Image: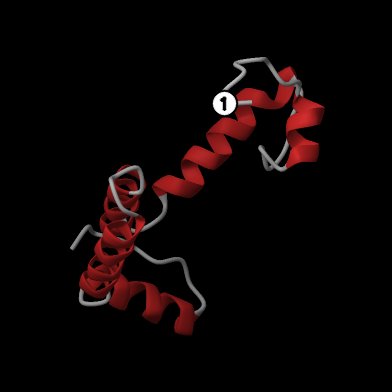
Amino acid sequence: MVLSGEPVDADTALAWGAVDFVVGADLLDQRALDIAQMIAAKPPLALAMGKQMIDQIHGPQLRSGMGQELLAQTALFLTEDYKEARAALREKRKPLYRGR
């Protein structure tokens, strides 16, 4: 698919596992909004690190990316947002992330 540049229809992409789901055009905007809201509710520092890790995966060596991931994860365990996530889980409530 990457090398040929040929288009792949939605059903084929789903069958190949290239996409997680397929929605009709009438539901596309709502589904995109739902996903955006779900992502926006996550801890901002973890999101930032996740985006950085995605950028790093295309670097020269996978091992380097994995090392970066380990450092990021270790740093995130020390944040207030991580503590808030753990507390919210224990208390069965939605977490309130502050980006700290």
Which residue is found at the position 35% from the left and 42% from the top? 58
The foreground one among 66 and 84 is 66
Q: Colour scheme used in the picture? A: secondary structure
Q: Percent from the top left, x then y, of residue 78?
A: 21, 77
Residue plotted at (81% across, 29% down) = 11
Residue at the image point whose x is 46% and y is 66% from the top: 94
Q: Which residue is rendered at x = 27% and y = 76% of the image?
A: 77
> Horizontal placement of 26 versus 52: left or right?
right
Whether residue 94 is situated above or below residue 54 in the rendered picture = below
Quarter of the rendering containing residue 88: bottom left
The residue carrying mark 1 is 2
Vertical placement of residue 2 versus 94, above or below: above
**Secondary element type, mark 1:** loop
Q: Amino acid at mark 1?
A: Val
21 vs 35, left or right, is: right
Q: Position of residue 49 (x, y in %)?
A: 28, 54
Q: Quadrant of the C terminus?
A: bottom left
Q: Front-most of 68 and 52? A: 68
- Image quadrant where one finds the N terminus: top right
Task: Provide residue 54's location: percent of width, then percent of height.
Answer: 36, 46
